[in-house]
Image (cartoon, grey):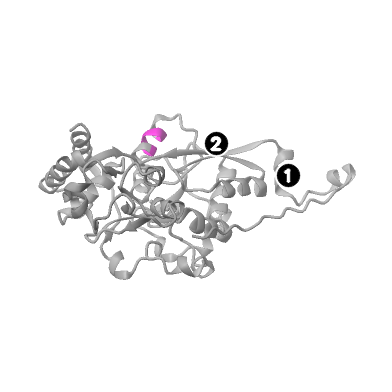
Amino acid sequence: MSRYAVLFCALVVTLSGCTKKDEASAPTADPAAAAKAAGPQEVNLAIWANYLSPEMQERFTKETGIKLKISNFSSNEELLAKIQAGASGYDVAVPSDYMVGVLAKLNLLQALNTEKVPNRGDLDPAFMKQGFDPENKFSLPYAWTTAGLAVNTELYKGNVKGWKDLFAKKDLAGKVSLLDDVREVTAAALKANGYSVNTIDPKELAKAEATLKDARKKVKMYSSDTIDALVNKEVAVAHTYSSDALQAAVKSGGKIVYVIPEEGGTRAIDNLVILKSAKNVEAAHKLVNFLLSHDANLAFVTTIMGGSVLKSTKEALPANLQSNPALFPSAAVLSKLEGIQDVGDATKLYDRLWTEVKSE
């Protein structure tokens, strides 16, 4: 789960000197110093690529004294496989909506201690109490994105309005990349045929499979890390997440444009969860709380270009971002978007389809 001016809030840490006697008799006000005195700490975060700026990583460590170790994944299914393998060592992860429910059913998540996440009070209710976690027992929203099409206008002068154009236009042969994600790619083909992205109808899935196989000759690569491919002109059109497309637009000086397909598509809510196997639960909660702070979320939207989940963020954004339709789609556009859901036993139908398409 694609995502302008850069805003950073400067962090000023004032260190006051003290004698050894003072240090022994009174606790330090500097959390980083306190953490250092208690011994080195580390928290491991599994997150989508290009979804947390280096500046925010550094700021978290400066504020808490806790080292942040980052691991990336390219799909929810890859994240699940890594967690199930038992060798991930993750404390906190950022799965998309339906995968939260899957992880919870598999008993791979632990309940959040919301008293340790005071910043949750600024969360927009529109992103809370979703079907995959109705009571937010295991998750809190971190961001949202849409999946659509990024077009490098230097390489392709044609008009791409949606999925049908992507799959049908002959002059795109060899110039296209699709996400390396079974549910997102199948969703694109399903929408092109007028179906729900969550269908479990074998006939509808068969038609989506035929669409993808027919378009296979157009596909140069399957990749969920599309920024470099777009900016370096490896592909003319990329199936991508809105946050990645907007980051690529900035890097290209506006030569890359993002299109939410006219047929509709997917909208993902990415969530913060703490794994059952987390080794540093206290630090994990500190990270969750930090990522939901106003400053961190503001920096996330202005640099990562992901959708905000906090009530206080939009009004603090530059005017050009407040009016950006990719960050704040209209109600009419949103009505055409669906969240990907857990389809239970029908998952095997999607997996079989994906195997057939990629081996074509």
Quarter occupied by residue 128 = bottom left
**Residue under pointer 1:** 34
| Quarter of the figure with residue 106 | top left
Q: Please name the residue shown 37% across and 62% down the image.
A: 326
- Inspect the image, locate mark 1, and give the three-letter code of the amino acid beneath it: Ala
Cα–Cα span, label 1 and label 2: 20 Å
For residue 145, above or below residue 235: below
Inspect this view and state whether residue 51 appears: yes
- The residue pinned by badge 2 equals 279
Q: Which mark is residue 195?
A: none
The one nearer the camera, 24 or 312, is 312
Residue that protrudes farthest toward the left in the picture: 203
Ranked by sequence position, the earlier of labels 1 and 2 is: 1
Give how far across and how far down residue 146 sits, in percent.
34, 56
User: Are dots 1 and 2 in contact, CB under 8 Å?
Assistant: no
Answer with left or right where residue 204 lies relative to residue 239.
left
Question: Could you tell me which secondary element the residue under label 1 belongs to?
Answer: helix
Amino acid at pointer 2: Lys
Q: Nearer the viewer, mark 1 or mark 2?
A: 1
Residue name at image x 79 percent, y 50 percent: 15
- Which quarter of the rendered picture does the C terminus lie within? top left
Q: Does 50 appear in magenta?
A: no
Q: Position of residue 155 (x, y in %)?
A: 31, 49
Q: Secondary structure at mark 2?
A: loop
Which range is magenta?
Answer: 79-83
Classify residue 60 as left or right of residue 251: right
Q: Is residue 349 visible?
A: no
Mark 1, Cα crowd under 10 Å, few <14 / some 14-19 / many 20+, is: some
Counting from the top left corner in percent of width and height, residue 18 is at 86, 47
